[in-house]
Image (cartoon, grey):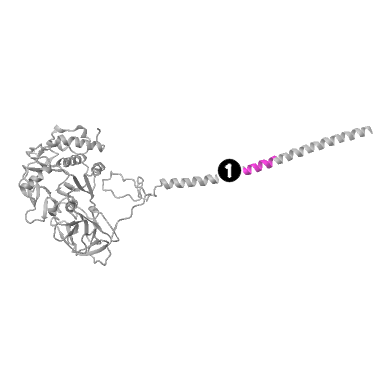
Amino acid sequence: MLINSVAMFSKGKCDVKYNRLKSESEAKAFNKRICALKIFYFSAILFVFVFIIFIYMQDYFKTSNAKFKAHNAKPIMQKNESKDTDLPNPPPSTHLPSVQTPHVDHTSTSPPAPKACGVQVKDSPVIKVGNLHTYVIGSYMDYRFREKQIKTIAIIRRQEQVKYRCVMCCEGRNVTSPAEYIIHSDHFGFEYGTATITCHISSPCSKPTHVAITAREISESITSFQPVRNRDVPAVFPFEFTICISVMYDYKNVLNLVESMEMFRLLGAQRVAIYKTNCDSDTQKVLDYYVKRGFVEIIPWTIKKHINVSSGWRKDLSSGQLHYYGQIPALNDCIYRYMYQSHYVALHDIDELILPLKVKTWTELLPELERIYGTTVGFEFENNVFSFNAKPHMEYKQDKWKNVPGWNILNYIERIPINPSAFNNYKVIVSPRLVLKATVHGLLETVNPGSTTVRVSNSIARMYHSKNFIYPQNTNLIRDDHLWDYAKDLIPAVSKVLQDCGFIEA
């Protein structure tokens, strides 16, 4: 019995111990489950929180990236488009290929195109007339006749027979009149020639602001108008002397350009009008310098986009449809452009200088010429060539100019003798109000009957033409250092411009 009691006691003790152990095991298992659930719920909450942040950040970066791309985006390039351009349609340049296309801000809104009488206005120097082989250059009021007129300088295919009509915008309404035209005789046999189209202004239209030249009836719509310049005649001319340069093409002689510009200043010119086809980037830098200072006006000369221009003056030696880059219509346009803006105009090239021999400036020279020859003619100046192939004289050599493209004209002071049996390529200075038709060497027609120009004695003034020119080896050159009379003023003026433009150091 004792044994049974002991056994029962031992069994009970074991049961208690077993139950206690069982309870502890279950508690531990329960606690483990509670822990697992806590970890699960915490992980789930953390996952949801991280997922929300991920979605938010993805949207944020997507939006920011879109804004960044929109701000810095480049247009998709076409198959053959250069990778270096930032513009889908780069504007045409009138420079040689070395000039970089300027940056264009595409975010700005372009101003609306101007209109006249409800029609678009074009201020381009070359405008095609409908489907005709006619190109309008510029239109100008002409007050030299009893009846006021609009003179339009144009380029016309000579074989084309057209009856033109003028459509003028007057106080918001269109007024029409028949047009007369005449093709100038100095076309040199080329297919196209310079022409003057005349619009007569009737009483209902005293001062038209714009004009269109057309070969159609007024019932046909007018697609564009051109401004009429010179509508007002100033009491005092803004410029005493203007130089008309036609035309600048493939130009890259920086030093010659600066020397010529500063010589023009010393001679008394206040404005140089350049009809420019193209030039290199260094030349453009100099032109921009003078344009900014109001000394130069650039007229983009884009006729070669429309007509095949020749590079020479003889058709049998130079192919093309229009004489020598369209030089003659440009000269005539310049005459009318400055008709009421300049007392005198000089018609010559950049490498030509008309130098007085007894005085230093044109301001002193012209009154003397008018006293001697009268005021009803233009003045011709004998052409004298100073070749860059001659031996240079280095008295005014400038070492700091040696890396500037071009020649120092002060180094070439020997001129080639005049051949009396050959035509002399003289140039003129004239009051533009005398001129009806200008040509390369002289005037075709003026408002006065009789002589159009008179040759100035070469003891009073002559033209100095510095250029590359091949001459026979046995030629006896004539020393003429008159240009050195300007050296003291010319050299520092040229150096300053070259410094300002970054070609030389101070």
Q: Is residue 37 magenta?
A: yes
Query: Which of 95 and 436 lies nearest the eye of the viewer?
Result: 436
Q: Which residue is mark 1?
A: 50
Q: Amino acid at mark 1?
A: Val
Q: Position of residue 432 (x, y in %)?
A: 14, 52
Which range of residues does the magenta coloring cover? 35-45
Quarter occupied by the C terminus: top left
**Helix, strand, or loop for circle 1?**
helix
Image label count: 1
Q: Is residue 334 magenta?
A: no
Q: Residue furthest front?
A: 235
Q: Residue at x 11, y 55 (%)?
A: 445
Q: Position of residue 205 (x, y in %)?
A: 21, 62
In which quadrant of the rendered view does residue 225 lie?
A: bottom left
Q: Is residue 502 above or below residue 424?
A: above
Callout 1 crowding tier (Cα within 10 Å): few <14, some 14–19, many ≥20: few
Of helix, strand and loop, which mostly describes the magenta segment? helix
**Is any part of residue 149 visible from this angle?**
yes
Q: Is residue 380 above or below residue 196?
A: above
